[in-house]
Image (cartoon, rainbow, N blue to C red):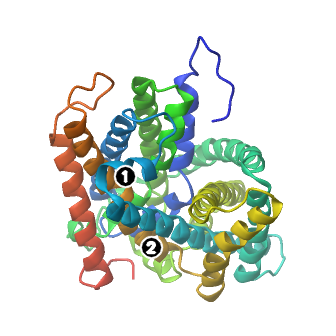
């Protein structure tokens, strides 16, 4: 985002697309096959596609609203001006909760996957110890600043891309259509398990915090930013679909129950795939890919939480001030992960409910109010009038209802 931009030429769409795809695709993708195991491939793919559409529209709504304001204006500025201070407080609390719960989820996931990695090397390390050590390393990079995080993230992203293509080329070669479509399965009422999938799909398309930076990056060219959002989220959608095919086409549906009973952590999924494929090279690639996926997501989320807390608490950007903010950033999620080390799947589900406020409802309300206040705006606008706004708000209501029913244990759960 800090790349120098010439005065006469805007950056390529490719860079913005990569930023969005890299932000969306992370460790959260490992939760999808587990929570989708009840609805299985066909229904889960349809729900994922619908979620992608709604999350893309909400991002485009935030983009349209942002173009009414100076470049760089974020959620706090727009929400306070258009929706008032009370909603701004609620929106800020939802952002803080999502980033905090995801930090906890990634600490939990990193401990589990690193324990699995060390076990393969005959090194007995507990998940708590591995998670603690890795969290302290991430905290060091976050304390050093954005430049350090961006350099490390670039390394992780490169490794993730390379291992992704190597891994999925192997996984897809082992896919069995009888497993993917559950031919001869005993459970025919798959759709009733689909409701549980919605909050997890929503949490898997979080990129809205990057939109303000892209507007600055492309100097207010809304059309270019819109193309980045479209292409970036489409690429993420394709990756998710390939991942679902690769896992559901190799692991029998019934085996996901045991994975869920282990907390749905990444190491359980890695173990299941490794045991079924009986391929040492694919098992290594799967471990490497999952490690880098967790690491890149972990760095991005914690840096976002750090920046939000620093701005909220008006912390000094010097070494001492950054140290204080770093401690505040990690102390609660790390403590929770040490006490409840297997909460990855549950945490992602809670993130979906909280993200509904700031990534779905708030953008829809913002664009609705902005169109009232700026009726003669001549810049880029999302087409379709109020129909996309209504669709996104209905999606938000559906997600809230499903999440609350889930927390009350009123929805059928397959993988339990």
- Give the labeled residue for mark 1: 79
Q: Earlier in the sequence, mark 2 or mark 1?
A: 1
Q: Quadrant of residue 252?
A: bottom left
Mark 2 packing: few (<14 Cα in 10 Å), some, or many (20+)? many
Q: Residue at x 51, y 74 (%)?
A: 264
What percent of the width, then of the height, locates residue 206?
45, 53
Side of 271 where 227 appears, left or right: left
What percent of the width, then of the height, locates residue 352?
39, 65
Q: Quadrant of residue 281?
A: bottom right
> Could you say which is closer to the camera, residue 76 or residue 246?
76
Q: Residue at x 32, y 81 (%)?
A: 407
What secondary structure is found at the residue carrying circle 1? helix
Give above or below for 165 relative to 143.
above
Q: Is residue 414 visible?
A: yes
Side of 231 where 311 appears, left or right: right
Side of 401 where 304 appears, left or right: right
> Could you say which is closer to the camera, residue 209 or residue 156?
209
What secondary structure is found at the residue carrying circle 2? helix
> Could you say which is closer to the camera, residue 195 or residue 360?
360
What percent of the width, then of the height, locates residue 140?
80, 63
Q: Is residue 207 visible?
A: no
Label tally = 2
The disc at residue 256 is 2
Asked whether the residues under the numbered discs 2 and 1 touch, taking CB atoms below 8 Å apart as contact, a structural biologist would say no
Mark 1 packing: few (<14 Cα in 10 Å), some, or many (20+)? many
Side of 327 where 169 appears, left or right: left
The N terminus: image quadrant:
top right
């Amino acid at each position: 985002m800090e790349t120098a931009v010439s005065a006469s030429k805007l950056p390529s769409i490719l860079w913005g697309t990569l930023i969005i795809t890299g932000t969306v695709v992370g460790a959260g993708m490992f939760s999808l096959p587990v929570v989708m195991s009840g609805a299985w491939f066909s229904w889960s793919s349809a729900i994922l596609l619908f979620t992608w559409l709604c999350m893309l529209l909400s991002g485009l709504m935030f983009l349209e609203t942002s173009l009414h304001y100076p470049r760089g204006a974020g959620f706090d500025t727009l929400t306070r001006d258009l929706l008032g201070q009370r909603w701004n407080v609620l929106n800020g609390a939802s952002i803080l909760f999502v980033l905090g719960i995801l930090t906890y989820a990634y600490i939990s996931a990193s401990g589990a996957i690193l324990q699995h990695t060390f076990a393969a090397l005959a090194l007995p390390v507990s998940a708590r110890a591995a998670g603690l050590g890795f969290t302290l390393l991430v905290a060091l990079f976050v304390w050093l600043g954005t430049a350090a995080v961006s350099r490390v993230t670039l390394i992780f992203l490169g490794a993730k891309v390379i291992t992704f293509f190597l891994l999925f080329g192997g996984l897809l070669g082992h896919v069995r259509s009888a497993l993917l479509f559950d031919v001869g399965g005993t459970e025919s009422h798959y759709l009733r398990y689909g409701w549980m999938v919605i909050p997890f799909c929503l949490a898997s398309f979080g990129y809205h915090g990057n939109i303000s930076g892209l507007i600055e990056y492309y100097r207010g060219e809304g059309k270019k930013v819109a193309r980045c959002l479209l292409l970036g989220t489409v690429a993420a959608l394709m990756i998710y679909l390939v991942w679902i095919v690769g896992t559901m086409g190799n692991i029998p549906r019934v085996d996901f129950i045991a994975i869920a009973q282990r907390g749905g952590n990444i190491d359980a999924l890695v173990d299941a795939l490794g045991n079924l494929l009986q391929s040492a090279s694919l098992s290594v690639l799967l471990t490497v890919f999952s490690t880098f996926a967790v690491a890149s997501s972990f760095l991005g989320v914690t840096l976002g939480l750090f920046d939000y807390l620093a701005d909220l608490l008006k912390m000094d950007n010097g070494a001492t001030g950054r140290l204080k903010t770093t401690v505040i950033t990690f102390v609660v999620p790390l403590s929770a992960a040490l006490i409840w080390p297997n909460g990855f799947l549950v945490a992602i589900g809670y993130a979906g409910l909280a993200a509904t406020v700031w990534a779905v409802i708030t953008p829809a309300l913002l664009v609705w109010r902005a169109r009232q206040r700026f009726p003669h705006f001549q810049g880029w606008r999302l087409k379709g009038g109020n129909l996309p706004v209504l669709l996104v708000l209905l999606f938000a209501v559906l997600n809230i209802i499903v999440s609350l029913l889930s927390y009350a244990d009123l929805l059928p759960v397959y993988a339990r």
